[in-house]
Amino acid sequence: MDLNLASFFKDYEWLIEYLKRMVKPAAALAVVLLAVILSYSQNLSLEGEMIYSVFRSFLQLSVIGFVLQFIFSQENSGWIVLAYLFMVSVAGYTAGQRAKHVPRGKYVAGVSILAGTSITMFLLVVLNVFPFTPRYIIPIAGMMVGNAMTVTGVTMKQLRDDIKMQLNLVETALALGATPRQATLQQVKRALVISLSPVLDSCKTVGLISLPGAMTGMIMGGASPLEAIQLQIVVMNMMVGAATVSSITSTYLCWPSFFTNAYQLQTHVFSSD
């Protein structure tokens, strides 16, 4: 019996170690309980959603932790590409949902995010900023894809909404011989400025208001603050680059959905709220 028990603990040593490390995250549920109590006391009816959200995040992070553990132990770079494409697919779907009135919005968002993040990662690898290994590329790709997802979704939605609000101006410009790009130049600029402003504001205030996640993680992991700062500078630069390329690409890909081949507005695109 003792032998079987010892064998069991040996076979599932990784699981036991994982459960031990989950003691602190479990203790942190106290603040979630506080939020649930406050929600109930204020009649917000958010208790169920709070509990579901926390449970879902716990499940997702636990699964992705085991997946990353597996990928990091592999030598095949194909796993990097597969993980990256999965992230881009989910991000494209999410950004497309935000811009749900843009035809083929999920496709436009996915291609735009793929373009922006792949170009940025390619430059980082070529310039030897990061080695092409799972331990570096997957976390970097995750940060870039997540940021590009938000910016791209906002760009697409804002562009469509601005054109809808100024349909008469756009149609007048088209009637006078302007191309779709010329007719919507101001709307495109406005959409890009609105979507990229939070990214730029974050760069301006980084380290002054709050310490970013990558930098905080390194410091808590034992790295020196100077090493953490160097990494964070790279992270902020790549996020600006990826977000800018992705958002601009999305505006180009939106035009075929907004206009006909005869340079006329697709009125059905702008008829729904």
Image (tube, rainbow, N blue to C red):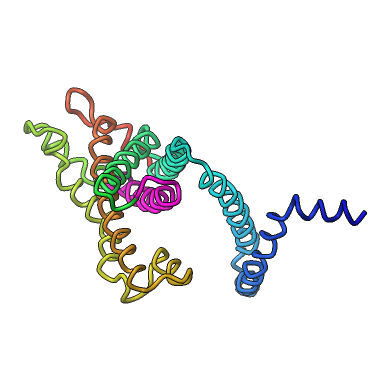
Position of residue 93 in the picture relative to residue 226 (left or right): right
Residue located farthest toward the right when viewing the structure as drawn: 1
Report if residue 153 lies within the magenta region: yes
**Nearer to me, 80 or 182:** 80
Q: Residue at x 21, y 41 (%)?
A: 167
Q: Residue 28: x percent and y percent?
A: 62, 71
Question: How many numbered dots are placed on residues in this image?
Answer: 0
Q: Residue at x 27, y 65 (%)?
A: 203
**Placement of 138 over or under 27, stated as above or below:** above
Position of residue 118 in the picture relative to residue 93 (left or right): left
Q: Residue at x 48, y 68 (%)?
A: 221
**Dominant secondary structure of the residues highlighted in magenta in the image:** helix
- Residue 40 visible in rendering: no
**Nearer to me, 189 or 133:** 133
**Nearer to me, 268 or 246:** 246
Q: Quadrant of residue 27?
A: bottom right
Report if residue 225 lies within the magenta region: no
Position of residue 36 in the picture relative to residue 210 (left or right): right
Q: Quadrant of residue 43?
A: bottom right
Quadrant showing the N terminus: bottom right
Q: Residue 179: x percent and y percent?
A: 12, 32
Q: Residue at x 40, y 63 (%)?
A: 214
Q: Quadrant of residue 14?
A: bottom right
Residue located farthest toward the top when viewing the structure as drawn: 261
- The residues colored magenta run 131-160
Q: Residue 12: x percent and y percent?
A: 74, 52
